[in-house]
Image (cartoon, rainbow, N blue to C red):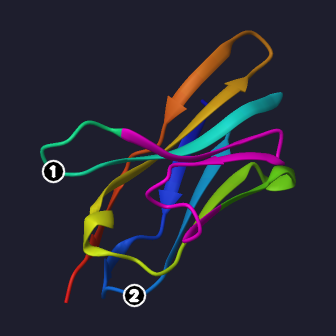
Amino acid sequence: QVQLVEAGGGLVQPGGALRRSCAASGNICSIDRMAWYRQAPGKEREVVASIIGGRSTYYSESVKGRFTISRDSANNTLYLQMNSLKPEDTAVYYCKAALRTLVRYLELWGQGTLVTVST
């Protein structure tokens, strides 16, 4: 069974930092793209950052310069380093992966974790 398991998150004060991880496990042949999304209360889910092939990255304007996405290809693990956090970064954060097994192409979501930025 292929799955994504997230870790990290919780409560942090404004200006603080958090690091999230997302580990993909199972019979994976390759991972095409991994990304972080977030969904704030009352808002639609939005992409925060993505990485393709371990090098090509994208960041939303709201997090550019503060967040860093990275990937450990050897361990199929995705990271999101979040610095200079603001209250408006409060949301449930999800990882997503587009990957291939021997028999199919899958797009999977992690379980999501709440990040709260507050005093």
Residue in view at x 40 percent, y 77 percent: 85
Q: Nearer the viewer, residue 21 or 85?
A: 85
Nearer the observer: mark 2 or 1; the answer is: 2
Residue 75: give x, y in percent of width and height: 79, 54
Disc marking residue 9: none
Q: Is residue 98 above or below residue 50?
A: above
Quadrant location, the C terminus? bottom left
What residue span does the magenta drawing correspond to? 46-68
Check whether the beta carbons of the residues at disc 2 and disc 1 lie within 8 A of each other.
no
Which residue has dot 2 on it?
15
Residue 28 appears in view: no
Q: Is residue 1 left or right of residue 92?
A: right
Q: Residues within 10 Å of mark 2 (few under 14, many from 20)?
A: few
Residue 58: give x, y in percent of width and height: 65, 45
What kind of residue is marked 1?
Pro
Residue in view at x 21 percent, y 82 percent: 118
Residue in view at x 27 percent, y 65 percent: 88
The verdict on residue 52 being magenta is yes
Residue 116 sits in quarter: bottom left
Q: Is residue 5 left or right of residue 99?
A: left
- Under tag 1, what secondary structure? loop
C-alpha gap between disc 2 and disc 1: 21 Å
Q: Is residue 8 left or right of residue 118?
A: right
What kind of residue is marked 2?
Gly
Residue 30: give x, y in percent of width and height: 82, 30
Q: Nearer the viewer, residue 36 or 46?
A: 46
Residue 34 sits in quarter: top right
Q: Is residue 85 above or below residue 14?
A: above
Which residue has dot 1 on it?
41
Q: Nearer the viewer, residue 64 or 35?
A: 64
Q: Nearer the viewer, residue 109 or 86?
A: 86
